[in-house]
């Protein structure tokens, strides 16, 4: 039975996650459910899109990902079933697939529309439980993707780049994500730091016109309370504060300008 991962902004204090799991296990009792996180910042689609892309390489082919960050629930927004690199994802068509779609070749993209795979009664405010969860379960039970709806080549994408801009020998980056430690994860990729310089440490990082100096290997290379730039486990350049929160020092993502020279 395939793995079904769960990424939501539901939190864990209410019944939402339990209901989601109950629907899946009622229809696919042998499914292996993996809670990636239910702590996506409420309504923050970009947060969910980043987490979804980050976990993708670490799951085996055949995995089904259920991603629900859905501020447009009950509206005319569509629900999609996408396939990338042998894995499937079910999500609202609101930008949650942005980083996957821009980074990986699409094997297929379908609009979820066949009501026979939904629960008999569909709430206008809980499509995660009544539509997406049963679709994930039926997919795990072997229903072919083509049974759920027609192919589409159109989907909503966030106005964010998953790769920083290289101008001459300056990389200009944006913040994609802020983790729970307040670290700013930028869209400057590790491979972009390999050229045209010989060594990663040859680059100098500037955040909002403040020089952080060279790229370090980790927090320990600077004193407590000092900012530091390093390539994290995400494979992106990150801006941290040793034993502190970089987001509090430099501001929210939309206010942060990162340059690497």
Image: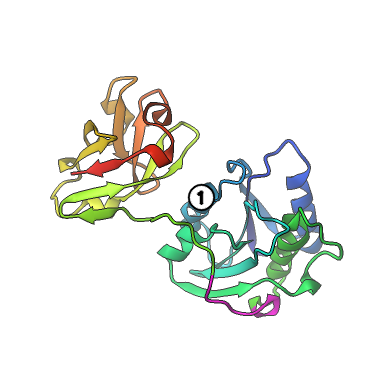
Q: In the rendered image, which residue does mark 1 sit on?
A: 46
> Residue extending furthest right?
120
Q: Nearer the viewer, residue 244 or 71?
A: 71
Q: Which residues are magenta?
A: 146-154
Left or right: residue 68 versus residue 233 is right
Main secondary structure along the magenta-highlighted residues: loop
Q: State yes or no: residue 59 in magenta.
A: no
Q: Nearer the viewer, residue 110 or 12?
A: 110
**What crowding class fits label 1: few (fewer than 14 Cα within 10 Å), some (14-19), or many (20 or more)?**
many
256 in relation to 227, above or below: below
Q: Quadrant location of the C terminus?
A: top left
Q: Quadrant location of the N terminus?
A: bottom right
Q: State yes or no: residue 153 in magenta.
A: yes
x then y, percent, for residue 198: 13, 50
Say what secondary structure mark 1 lies in: helix
Determine which quarter of the picture holds residue 223. Answer: top left
13 in relation to 118, above or below: above
Left or right: residue 224 versus residue 92 is left
x then y, percent, for residue 54: 47, 52
Residue at figure coordinates x 63%, y 44% from the top left: 38
227 in relation to 103, above or below: above
x then y, percent, for residue 227: 31, 28
x then y, percent, for residue 51: 51, 49
Residue at figure coordinates x 15%, y 51% from the top left: 169
Does residue 215 appear in this view? no
Residue at figure coordinates x 52%, y 61% from the top left: 97
């Amino acid at each position: 039975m395939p793995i079904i991962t769960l990424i939501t902004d539901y939190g864990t204090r209410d019944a939402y996650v339990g209901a989601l799991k109950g629907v899946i296990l009622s229809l696919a009792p042998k499914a292996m459910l993996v809670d990636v996180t239910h702590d996506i910042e409420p309504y923050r689609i970009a947060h969910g899109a980043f987490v979804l892309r980050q976990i993708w390489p670490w799951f085996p082919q055949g995995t089904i990902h259920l991603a629900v960050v859905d501020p447009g629930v009950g509206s005319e927004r569509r629900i999609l079933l996408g396939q990338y690199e042998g894995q499937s994802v079910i999500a609202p068509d609101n930008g949650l697939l942005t980083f996957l779609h821009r980074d990986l070749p699409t094997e297929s993209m379908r609009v979820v529309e066949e009501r026979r795979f939904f629960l008999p009664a569909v709430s206008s405010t809980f499509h995660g439980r009544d539509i997406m969860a049963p679709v994930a379960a039926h997919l795990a039970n072997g229903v072919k993707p083509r049974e759920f709806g027609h192919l589409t080549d159109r989907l909503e994408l966030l106005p964010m780049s998953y790769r920083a801009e290289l101008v001459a020998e300056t990389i200009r980056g944006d913040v994609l994500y802020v983790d729970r430690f307040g670290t700013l994860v930028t869209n400057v990729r590790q491979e972009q730091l390999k050229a045209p310089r010989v060594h990663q440490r040859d680059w100098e990082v500037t955040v909002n016109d403040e020089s952080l100096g060279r790229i370090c290997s980790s927090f320990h290379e600077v004193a407590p309370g000092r900012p530091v730039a390093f390539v994290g486990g995400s494979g992106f350049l990150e801006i941290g504060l040793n034993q502190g929160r970089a987001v509090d020092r430099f501001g929210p993502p939309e206010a942060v300008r990162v340059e690497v020279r």
